[in-house]
Image (cartoon, rainbow, N blue to C red):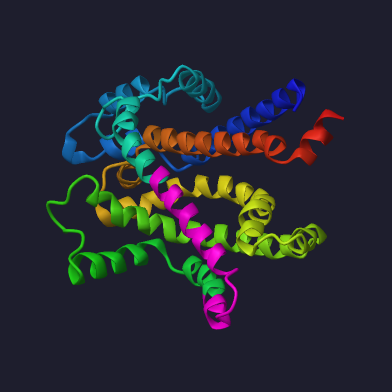
Amino acid sequence: MKSTQVLLRVGQAILVLLAAFTLAFILLTALPGDAVTTRYSNPELGLSEAEVSQIRESYGLDQPLIIQYFMTLANFLTGNFGYSVNSGTAVSNLMKSALPGTLTLAFLAFAASIVLAFCIAFASTLPGQGWLRRTVRALPAFMSSIPSFLIGIVLIQMISFQLGWVPVYGASNLQDLILPVLTLAVPISAPLAQVLVRSIDEVYTQPFVQVIRARGASERWIFFRDVLRNAMMPAITIAGVLFGELVSGAVVTEAVFGRAGLGNLTVQAVANRDTPVLLAVVVTAATAYIIINLIVDLLYPVLDPRLRRKANS
């Protein structure tokens, strides 16, 4: 890919991120009142209107909306996310504490979803046992229809309470990740498996597969060497899109399992109407989503020689 094309894709990603920040800022600030007024106007706190106004001024909420927008944007570009209205803690510190747990959960769940999707796709190509193939092919639609919170509850009931494989209390760090990872991986793997199975079926109809089979290659060689490699392109695209959904899925999953992370932080921020925290979470999630899709977009010509020749022509 030419350098100008790379710069164009990066520029588009930056514009999308700016649009996401602008939309999130407008939606969060367009709500009636503001977080400071909602929290500190409670008569039980005993604060006067002058004191509440002084607090609003310290957060810059006394400025016109357009000034607030550019001030917030400038702060975000320097890594300053402001301060939590609920606790007064720097939002950057809250994000640093919550982000590692969520990233660990997201990456492990993403890896597990890829493995599960490939297992379903491989099982769908096994010769014979037509009933088994039909059952395997029906699994993704069933998996995608189950809410993640229900998956988490069922896994806790079966694996922890019934089988006793993962203790409810006193679990190690590794054991504490098993059920949340599976809860996130199951719904994420479903559309990935659907796309992969459909792509494999399409590749099997291509003439080059018949040529390779006529040369005496085994079905396993054909599948792993030729079919799977050509069927991965659509799956890579949907994988990049699905990775962005892991953050929203983590909100529910971390709430079900009581894990500390961005999900739990978001739930608390919504309950307290903590606008600075919510804006930081939304922008962080949007940044991760955009970066992942940019990487996938840039890797396309590397993985597909046809696109590389087209880009260089």
Q: Which of 99 and 1 is in front in this view?
A: 1
Q: Which of 15 and 207 is in front in this view?
A: 207
Q: Nearer the viewer, residue 217 or 300?
A: 217
- Residue lying furthest left in this view? 170
Describe residue 44's horizontal placement relative to residue 189 as left or right: left
275 magenta-colored: no
Q: Residue at x 47, y 68 (%)?
A: 143
**Secondary structure that dominates the magenta span:** helix
Describe residue 77's horizontal placement relative to residue 210 as left or right: left
Q: In which quarter of the image is the C terminus?
A: top right
Tell me which segment is drawn in magenta: 107-135
- Residue lying furthest front in this view? 216
Describe residue 310's horizontal placement relative to residue 14 as left or right: right
Q: Residue at x 16, y 58 (%)?
A: 167
Whether residue 270 is situated above or below residue 148 in the rendered picture: above
Q: Point out residue 164 in the picture as x, y percentages from the top left corner.
A: 17, 65
Please tell me in which quadrant of the rendered image residue 131 appears: bottom right
108 magenta-colored: yes
Please tell me in which quadrant of the rendered image residue 84 appears: top left
Please tell me in which quadrant of the rendered image residue 215 appears: bottom right
Whether residue 156 is situated above or below residue 44 in the rendered picture: below
Q: Point out residue 297 in the picture as x, y percentages from the top left corner.
A: 66, 37
Tally of numbered tags:
0
Q: Point out residue 251 in the picture as x, y percentages from the top left corner.
A: 37, 50
Q: Which residue is drawn at 58% across and 32% down?
A: 17
Q: In which quarter of the image is the N terminus?
A: top right
Q: Point out residue 37 in the picture as x, y percentages from the top left corner.
A: 33, 35
Whether residue 159 is situated above or below residue 250 in the rendered picture: below
